[in-house]
Amino acid sequence: MMKPFELTFELGSNITLRDSAIHMDGLLSNVCFRHTGCTEKALSMLDDLLLFNQDYGIYHASALAFGVMAQQSIVACTRHYVGNMRHGDDLRDETLQPTWMRTPARAERYRNVYIKGGPERQRLNKFQAYYSPYLVFHGVGDIARIERLVQFYCARIGVNANSGSGTVKQMTIKEIGQDFSFIDAHGQVARNLPCSFLRAAQDGSLGASAMGGLGALASEPLPVRAPYWKTHHRFSTVDAVAVEKVRRVVI
């Protein structure tokens, strides 16, 4: 059931990223949470979707790569939108200032909402965004189940997806002949990788090819498996090499 695959999203709008790259096991853990409604069930379900490497504590799941073509590469841009931070609890009668307004017919009571400051003020948000024709992930897993779940739940990807960022026009997933979830076809790091994995790869014990130069990469404490958010009780870091946030693969 677990086979190497390539998952491709065709983008309909630019995408906003956080400081680190989106990993497919993190994306699928979110999909599983939306499907089950429980964080623990979601992580258990993730184990049935993706192959997990027990030796190094990582899923066979790459980070996001921008799919580029000869005629179109990545376009970096700034995304702006205006947001109003206004909640229902802020609009109760006792929290709003009563004033009066006189019309030709009668005096009517109305309420002011202060928007020059505080939680109701208008905000002009500014984010660094990117656009390319496609987003690409590689992994090893249950292709049929991943396709059904992603098709249903992944309408948008990235930060501020609920405001139109990272809109997915369509997705495709196909089986491929080689696993590119750790090291891509160009011999570059395809996801956050523990230093223990890279040392084994350099020694040749993993049978990995095109590993030249990876041993010189700087390492730091990083999360290498879902969940990637710090507030989760199962969040952890190891000494690892970070994947590039903006990585390219040729379509």
Image (cartoon, rainbow, N blue to C red):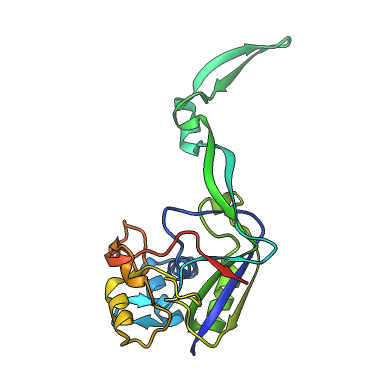
* Residue 107 falls in image quadrant: top right
Q: Nearer the viewer, residue 15 or 109?
A: 15
Which residue is found at the position 52% from the left and 44% from the top?
127
Q: Nearer the viewer, residue 72 or 193?
A: 72
Q: Residue furthest right?
A: 104
Which residue is found at the position 50% from the left and 66% from the top?
64
Tell me where residue 232 appears, x and y as whole percent: 32, 60
Would residue 54 be seen by someone viewing this image from the given angle? no
Quarter of the picture containing the C terminus is bottom right
Q: Residue furthest bottom?
A: 1
Q: Nearer the viewer, residue 234 or 36?
A: 234
Q: How many numbered badges does the structure rendering display?
A: 0
Q: Is residue 175 left or right of residue 234?
A: right
Q: Nearer the viewer, residue 57 or 244?
A: 244
Tell me where residue 210 appears, x and y as whole percent: 43, 80
Is 207 placed above or below 137 here? below
Q: Is residue 107 left or right of residue 199?
A: right
* Residue 82 falls in image quadrant: top right
Which residue is found at the position 63% from the left and 60% from the top?
73
Tell me where residue 95 appears, x and y as whole percent: 45, 26
Tell me where residue 71 appears, x and y as whole percent: 70, 63
Would residue 210 be seen by someone viewing this image from the given angle? yes
